[in-house]
Each structure stands twice: as C-alpha cells, then as structure tokens.
Amino acid sequence: MVDDSTTYVGIDASKAKHAVAIAESGRTGEVRYFGEIETTPAAVERFVRKLEKKHRRLHFCYEAGSTGYGLYRQIVAMGHACEVVAPSCVPMRPGDRVKTNRRDAITLARLLRAGELTGIWVPDDVHEAMRDLVQAREAASEDLRKKRQPLHSFLLRHGRIFTGRRQGSAAHLRWLAEQKFDHPAQQIVFQDLVDAVRDATDRLARFESHIEELVPVWSMAPFVAAYQALRGVSLIVAVIFAVEIGDVRRYGNPRQLMGFLGPVPSERSTGDSVKRGGLTLAGNRRARRALVEGAWGYRHPARVTETIRKRLENLPKVVRDIAWKALVRLCKRYRQMTSAGKKAPIVIAAIAREMAAFLWAIGRTVAPQPTA
C-alpha cells in the first residue's frame, strides 16, 4: 500500500557517501536513520526509486556546501521537492557537542518536517557558470594583491618610494623599469617580483575580458546594464551583485535584501530597552564588499560624469530617474554624516546599505532576457 502523506528525507551530503535519515509525516511520526549511499547519480536514483515505491510524496533537503547543486538538480528532475539549506540557518541546541553524519541527517529530516528549514535560492547551470567565472576573477584579484605586497616591501627596504598617484599605473610601471640595484642577487629578486606581479595582472585582465565578453549573452544582462546607472557600480561590481544575489524581484522589499547582505546594525532589545550593536555582516560577503567599495564614490559632489552618461544612453527613463535620485540622496547623506562627525567606516556602511535598496528598486524595473 502506498502512503499518500509526505515523507521527509534529510541528507548529510559529503564527498564519498551521503548519510540519509527519513522522517514520517505527523508530529509523532518515526524518525529513523536509513544509512549511507554512494554519491554517484546512479546510486542516488536507485535510492529515490526505492522510496517512491513506499511513499508517494517525498521532500528532500541537504546543507549547502562543497558538493554543489548536482544532487538538488537530480532530485528535482525526478519530480520531487528538494531544499538546499544554509548551514548557518540550521537550528542547533547550545548543549549539543556531538556532531556526526548520522546525527546531522536525522536533525535535517526532523527540522524539515517541522517546517524549521528555509531553502536557499539555487541558480541554474548558466548562472552557476557565471558565478564560477566571477569567483575565479576575485581569486585572481586577491592573488595580485598578495603578489604586490612583497614587491612593495622589497622596494621600501631599499629606500625606493614611488611618489606618483596610483600603484600599477603607466607611470608606476615606467618607474619600476628604471630601478637598478648594485648587487646581482638583489636585481634578480626584484625582477622576479616584478614578473610575478605582471603575470598576476595579466591573469586578472583575462578574467575581466571573459566576463565582459559573456555578459551580453547572459540572462542577467539587463540587470547588469541597469545596475551600472548608479555611481560606484562598474561592470565588475554589477556582475558580482547579479551573480551573488540573482533576481532581486524575489525579495519582497529592500529591507529583506539589506538584511541578507549584512550592512545592517544588530539589535538586542527587551521591553523598553533598545540596544543596537555593530553590523550583522550576515549573508553574502562578496556582494557586500562590492557595494562597500562602490560606496566610496559618493564622497564626491553629485553630477553625471561622462562615464555614467554613456551608461545611461540606452536605459529606460525610470532607471535613469532612480539613478539620479540615488546620486543626489547618497551624496547628501555622505556630507551630512561626515559633518556630524561620523567615522568613515560607519558612513560607508550606511551608503552601501542604501545602495542595496536603490539596486533593488532598479532590479524591479527590468526582467531577464532569454538565454541563448
């Protein structure tokens, strides 16, 4: 006899084997440990087909991690519901000090049945591919930063200080080419450090070129173009925001988006006592950092530069109006908070928080394009 009620399946996903627990429907339903299965698609399909013979409705869940979304896509393709849960959102008892695959699977099955788990947004294959490219570009940028530090330290130890405006500019490269050292060993070390920085710079430029080439055929291209109407949102910042957040229309209001990004103050209030602390810094770190970097542009007076004017040419009027409103408001807010004696990190965090709200408003006016 086939049971019509929903059966909840918790999976503790790992590299070699998945630990599986099953929770029957109802508050008093049995929660039992099923065992371990292989991580291959064939083994997963056999396991799901076996459950289908006894249970008509199945609801799966597992924690997001290094195993990716392949398990989710396979289960959904077989016609069953599946949730990918953020590990930070799984309730844990303060006194629970034992963590095993068996316990994790049972906990997931029980919490899924109780409705205590909320699934994250899962990108499609193309979106995930673009995210991989953007994250590879971020790794290349971090590698360049690490390669530059030994070079700067070496030059500083020998009293070679660049007095120009920006490291990595054409003037800085010419200055590096003019540096000479008396001892051959020092010249070898210097040249090796310069070559390492040059290779890292070229690698970063290649990733950025690939991103610029692939964005026009991506479904999120209208969002990326519209986001760039804001000051401080370059192509890279817009792409980072788009790949990490996805379609902002899934957020009902800008507060939800700001809360997800994390530049909002924490709070511990009880009764009439209201205590607010530092920023929660929850949610997506990459998107938050991109907004913080872009927020520094609002320290300058509000005006439409030539770069922004070119970005606005083919955008709808509603997007241009939102971008101008954001420019005037955020520049004014920066001046007001600075005049009030607020420290720069606090001001920038506030600007980044409001930038997220304006990006949400812009994202509500556009729609994805069909993927080629």
Image (cartoon, rainbow, N blue to C red):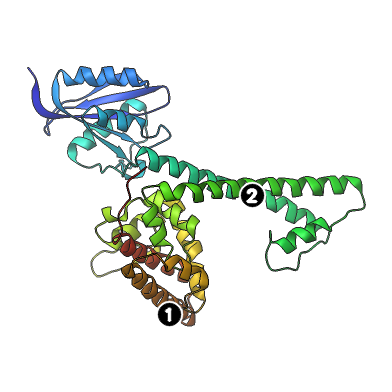
Contact check, label 2 and label 1, Cβ < 8 Å: no
- 359 on left or right of 239: left
For the question of whether residue 342 can be seen, the reply is yes
Residue 266 occupies which quadrant of the picture? bottom left
Specify the amino acid type for callout 2: Leu
Taking depth in this image into account, of 82 and 157 the one nearest to the observer is: 82
Q: Of the numbered discs in the image, which one, if any, rests on residue 144?
A: 2
**Residue drawn at the location 49% of the way across and 64% of the way down:** 294
Quarter of the picture containing the N terminus is top left
For the question of whether residue 263 can be seen, the reply is no
Image coordinates of residue 125 in percent, x first then y, are 37, 37
* Label 2 secondary element: helix
**Residue drawn at the location 35% of the way across and 60% of the way down:** 258
User: How far, Cα to Cα, is label 2 from label 1?
Assistant: 35 Å
Relative to 41, is 139 above or below? below
Image coordinates of residue 238 in percent, x first then y, are 44, 57
